Amino acid sequence: MFAYIKGNLEEKASNYVVIDVSGIGYKIYMSETAIQNIGEINNLVKVHTYYYVREDNISIYGFLSNEELKMFELLLSVSGIGAKTAIVMLSNITPSSFALAVISNDISNLTKIPGIGAKSAQRIVLELKDKLKTEQAITETNETKTDIEKDNVSNEVIDALQILGYNRREINKVLEKIDVDNLKIEDAIKLALKELSK
């Protein structure tokens, strides 16, 4: 319903902010990290939003980047993961670290997040990896494969970015600008996300 909300920051609480837009105050739930980084009271701010509707709950969730929003949407698609758990995860792991944990089956890293046990972590990895495989199949059917041979690092970066919702064409274009071979996987993912958000 709302792609983003832009207005004056009126209030900051532990798990939400209030943004005034032309005299209307929007209560927007955010991660602790996002609230810390959003800016000062009375500043003009812009947050990407997700309009969350359930039978007993209608809420707006806010994010400082599209990557955070995409990670939130991915988490909601995992059975047993609700909005509150997804927000807690965003407070404890960056989108690039999350994508890396999924592609590398790093269950131990995910279980460090409050509220995420071994079973939940395994479900997140299983369901999101399966989703990635489906998206890859669609991509390979609909798009011409690149002639460039990708090494293991590049492949892991590609997988991580696809988990965060980017398509192969966008990713290949960005990887042409990045010297992936001389970077750690997470650093390459972060650099690619920076380029993709321009």
Image (spheres, grey):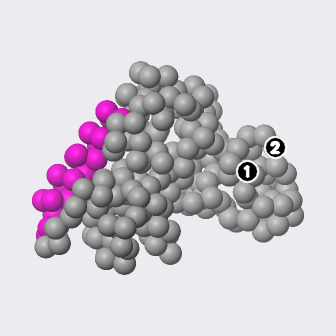
User: How many numbered marks have been drawn onto this rendered protein structure?
Assistant: 2
In the figure, is residue 78 to the left or right of 53? left
- Write down the residue under mark 1: 35
Q: Is residue 144 above or below residue 15?
A: below
* Spot occupied by residue 165 in the image (x, y as percentages of width and height): 38, 55
Residue 198 drawn in magenta: no
- Write down the residue under mark 2: 13
**Mark 2 vs mark 1, CA separation in Å:** 8 Å
The disc at residue 50 is none
Q: Which structural element holds mark 2?
A: loop
The one of 182 and 67 positioned closer to us in this rendering: 182
Residue 69 at least partly seen: no
Quadrant where the image shows the N terminus:
bottom right
Amino acid found under the numbered disc labelled 1: Ile
Where does the magenta region start and end? 125-145
Amino acid found under the numbered disc labelled 2: Ala
Residue under the point 38% across and 41% down: 102
In the figure, is residue 1 to the left or right of 36? left
